[in-house]
Amino acid sequence: MNREKRSLEFYVLAIFFTIFVLFLYGPLSAVIILSFQGPDGGLTFPLNGVSLHWFANLFEKQAVGDFGASFQRSLILGVMVMIVTVVVSLLAGLAFRRRFRGSTFLFYATVASLVVPSIIISLGIGVVFQQGGIAPAWYSSAFGAHLTWTLPFGVLIMFAVFNRFSPAYEEAARDLGASSWQTFRHVVLPMIAPSLIGVGLFGFTLSYDEFARTLMTSGTYNTLPLEIYGMTTNVTTPVLYALGTVTTLFSFTIILLALAVMIMLGRRQAKKS
């Protein structure tokens, strides 16, 4: 029996992928394992017993850090950013289906923030708010700073979606007497719904995890990434690892829910067709 000979490129890519997985999931696995330390456990291996003590400790009053409030702020901010990102990206995708005067400049102005260092944007927005006599806050200045990060990605995704979208579907709907709104509501929107969910998921996760653009714009109250960063210099117990495990599981749960909704919408669309 002849075996197919693997090329050198295959082994190079296999080694690269293995290293990538180790760098990605190795530290994460260590954090999750250490979060199950016993009550007398420390921040390093080996484990001193196994328990859920530090997860329960998350819900107790801490000497430093406010987990619940910072998580709530990050969650609300992420939802706000997600909604605006989806709406604006959809409108931009529809608008750029036809060229108009200034469209090229507007496109490059939209994606320019991707090449500007995040800390510079955070610093600039914070200074502008302070000079304007407005106190920076997570729901105002940080909200705007996060949109400079999420909107370019959302717009680029919708550009790619509409670039592959055939106008024949809309023409067929109009030939059957559908209005512009009915065509959008019953034809365009169901077909691009999975992409909109992806844009929303992208916007939420980018905002929920954002650190640099929040650093100078969050004001008095921290979001969860800032709270975790502050805890790294003060907390000396595995409660920090327990918080990392909980937030990681929360992120994976959001991703799985979004994938489930996308699959459900795909199956429904397939049944209709």
Image: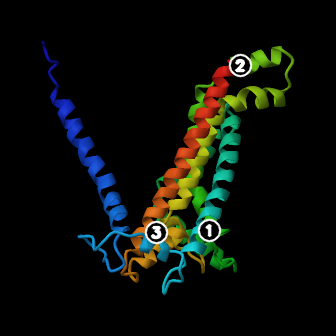
> In the displayed structure, does residue 145 sit left or right of residue 6?
right
Element type where label 2 sits in the image:
helix
Residue located beneath label 2 in the image: 169
Q: Residue 188: image x %, image y %?
A: 71, 28
Residue located beneath label 1 in the image: 72
Nearer-the-camera pick, 24 or 218: 24
Q: Is the residue 190 above or below the residue 4 in the image?
A: below
Q: Residue 31 sits in which quadrant?
A: bottom left
Q: Which of labels 2 and 1 is toward the front?
A: 1
Mark 3 residue type: Leu
The crowding category of the residue bearing disc 3, from other C-alpha atoms within 10 Å (few below 14, some 14 to 19, many at least 20), is many
Element type where label 1 sits in the image:
helix
Nearer-the-camera pick, 198 or 168: 198
Residue located beneath label 3 in the image: 243
Residue under the point 56% across and 75% down: 222
Mark 1 residue type: Gln
Nearer-the-camera pick, 270 or 239: 239
Which of the two labelled residues, at mark 1 and mark 3, occupies the earlier sequence position? 1
Q: Residue 264: image x %, image y %?
A: 62, 33
Asked if the residues shown at circle 3 and circle 2 are in contact, with their CB atoms under 8 angstroms apart, the answer is no
Q: Residue 33 sits in which quadrant?
A: bottom left
Q: Residue furthest left?
A: 1
Asked if the residues shown at circle 2 and circle 1 are in contact, with their CB atoms under 8 angstroms apart, the answer is no
Q: Report how far apart the C-alphas of labels 1 and 3 lie in the structure.
A: 14 Å
Mark 2 residue type: Tyr
> In the displayed structure, does residue 19 sit left or right of residue 212?
left
User: How many numbered callouts?
Assistant: 3
Q: Which of labels 1 and 3 is toward the front?
A: 3
Give the position of the N terminus as an image quadrant: top left
